[in-house]
Image: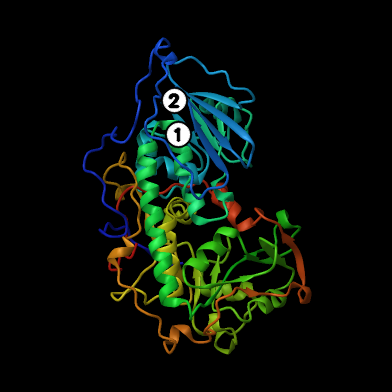
Amino acid sequence: MKFVGLAILAGVFSSCALADTPSTDGLQNTDCISSSSSSSSSSLYAAKVEVKHAKLFSIDYHDTYKVVNNLSTNTTYVLYQCGSNKPMVEDADAFIPIPVGSAAAWSTSAAMFIESLGVQDRVKNLGTAPSIVSACLQELLEDVIKPFDEGNATSTDEQEQSNDVVFNMPAGEDLNATNTVLSSEYLESSALGRSEWIKFFAAFFNAEERANDAFDSIDSNYACFAKKADEEYDDLRPVVAWTSYAAPTEYNNNTAYWQISFADYKYDIVRDAGARMLNTTGAQATMFSSAPAFLDALEDVDIVIDESFVGYSYDELLKNYGIKDASKSSYSWVSASRVFRPDRLQSTAGGLDWFEAPVAFADALLQDLIGVVHPKFVKDGYQPIWFRNLADNEPVVVVAAANCTNMYAQREDPAKSCSSLSFQEANPDDSVYDGVDENQTEDLIYDLSKSEIINESGAGSDTSGSFQLAAVTIGTSCVVALAGLFAAL
C-alpha cells in the first residue's frame, strides 16, 4: 500500500484558531448554581435542541435539568445543573451533574462529536489511542489525554471512575458503571440521523448552541447536494455495491465468506448521491459462501466500494474476490476501474478516519460519494478525502500530531459549501459511465433464491457498520491534506 508524506494544505479541512486555549463561546451555564436558586421557575437552558432526523434519541428540558433518552438501548440519563438539587425522576439509569468537567470516550463517534463541539479539553481518557486519526487529539494524547490502560482491567476501571461521564457503545464492556452513557448513532437509518447525535452529546456539556449551529449547517448543505445530484444525474444512476471479504480465521470457523452490505444509511446516501443501490429485499447484509456466488450478485454493478479488513491493494482484492485476470473480466466495475476503498485518510497506526468524521459530517460524506459516483461533477476536478480508487493505485494520506495547529479548536465541517460549487451535467458518452443503464432510477434487486448464501442479516446487523464503534478512532480539528491534490471537501 502506498503512503503519502505528511502535509498541511488549506482546503481539505478548515484551518484552526491560532491560540491553544479552549473557548466558552456557544456554551451556556458553564458555572454551578446554588441549591436555593434551583427552585426558581425560570429555565436555565435558553438554548435547546430539536431532533429532526435522528430516530434513536430524545431530549426533554426542565428548569434545572434535562432528561436524555437513548431509545435504542432504552436507557435514560438525567442531567442536572451542578449545584442544584438532584431531581426526582423515576427509572433513570444515571444522574449526572452538568456541564461535565471530565469525560472519557471508548467509541469512535463519541470522540468525534466531542471534538466537533470543541470540548475536548474535558476529555481525560480515550480508547485504542494508536488508531486515532485526529491530529489534535493525537497531540493531546502526548501530554494531556491518557489512553485507557486496556490491558489492565483494574486500572481501566479506576480511569473510568475518575471521569464524570464515560461514553461507550452498547456492545462495550463495563456498561453498568453509574457514569456510563451509551450512544447508538451508528444504528441510525440515515446519514443525517447519525450526524444529528452531536445534539445528544451537546446536552452533557451545555453546548446546545454549538450543536444547533453545526448541525443546521450540515443539514442545509446536505439538502443542497442531494437536490443538485437529483437534478443533474436522475437519468444516469450507476449501481453501487458495498462489499467485503473475510479471510478464514478462528472467529469464523476458518471459513471465508463474502458480504454485500445494504445498511440503511448507505441506501439513503447512495440515492442522494445520484446512484442506485444493489439491494436485496428486507436484509441489511448478505453473506455468500463462495466467490462465484458473490460475483454473480455483482454482475450488473457499476461501482464497488470494498470495506474488507484484509487486502489493501487492487491485486489483493482481485485475488480475494476470485478474479484471476482483470483484463478478461466482464464486470464493468473492473473494466472501468471503479473499485474504491474508504481508507484514504489514516493515522500512522492505520486507524481510519472513515469511522470518525463521516459519521459526524453527513454533508461531507455525501459530497465525497458524489465524487465517486460522478467524478466530474466539479469543473475543476474532484479528489475525495475518504475514498481512494484501488484500480488506479491511489495512495493513502497519513495524519500525525505534527499536523495540528490548535488542539482545542472546535472541529469544523470538512465539506465545501454546496452553493459555491457548479455541478456539471453527466455525459452518458463519458467513459466513466460505460455500462451504466440510462433512465433507471430504482434500486437493482438481486434475487437471493438463486445464490449460495450463508445468511441474511436483519435491520441493524450490518457487520461492516459495526466496526464504526469497535475501531474507536477520532476525527481531526485541524488542516490535513495530501500535497498536490485538489481539496474537494
Q: In the rendered view of the protein, which quadrant contains the C terminus?
A: bottom left
Q: What residue type is labelled 2?
A: Ile
Q: Quick one: label 2, few (<14), some, or many (20+) residues within 10 Å?
A: many
Q: Quadrant of residue 417 in the image?
A: bottom left
257 to the left or right of 96: right
Percent across and percent down for residue 394 are 41, 71
Residue at image mark 1:
203
Up the image or down, 239 lies above or below 19; here it is below
Give SS at disc 1: helix
Percent across and percent down for residue 321 are 63, 74
- Labels 2 and 1: the sequence-earlier one: 2
Residue 98's label in the rendered image is 2
171 to the left or right of 46: right
Relative depth, front residue between 468 and 156: 468
Q: Is residue 147 visible?
A: no
Residue at 58 percent of width and 78 percent of height: 301
Q: Which residue lies furthest to the left in this view?
A: 18
Up the image or down, 368 lies above or below 105; here it is below
Give SS at disc 2: strand
Percent across and percent down for residue 271 are 52, 68
Q: Quadrant of residue 203 in the image?
A: top left
212 to the left or right of 298: left
Q: Distance between the residues labelled 2 and 1?
A: 8 Å
Q: Which amino acid does label 1 sit on?
A: Ala
Cβ–Cβ under 8 Å for marks 2 and 1: yes
Up the image or down, 361 lies above or below 341; here it is above
Q: Which residue lies furthest to the top in this view?
A: 36
Q: Quick one: label 1, few (<14), some, or many (20+) residues within 10 Å?
A: many
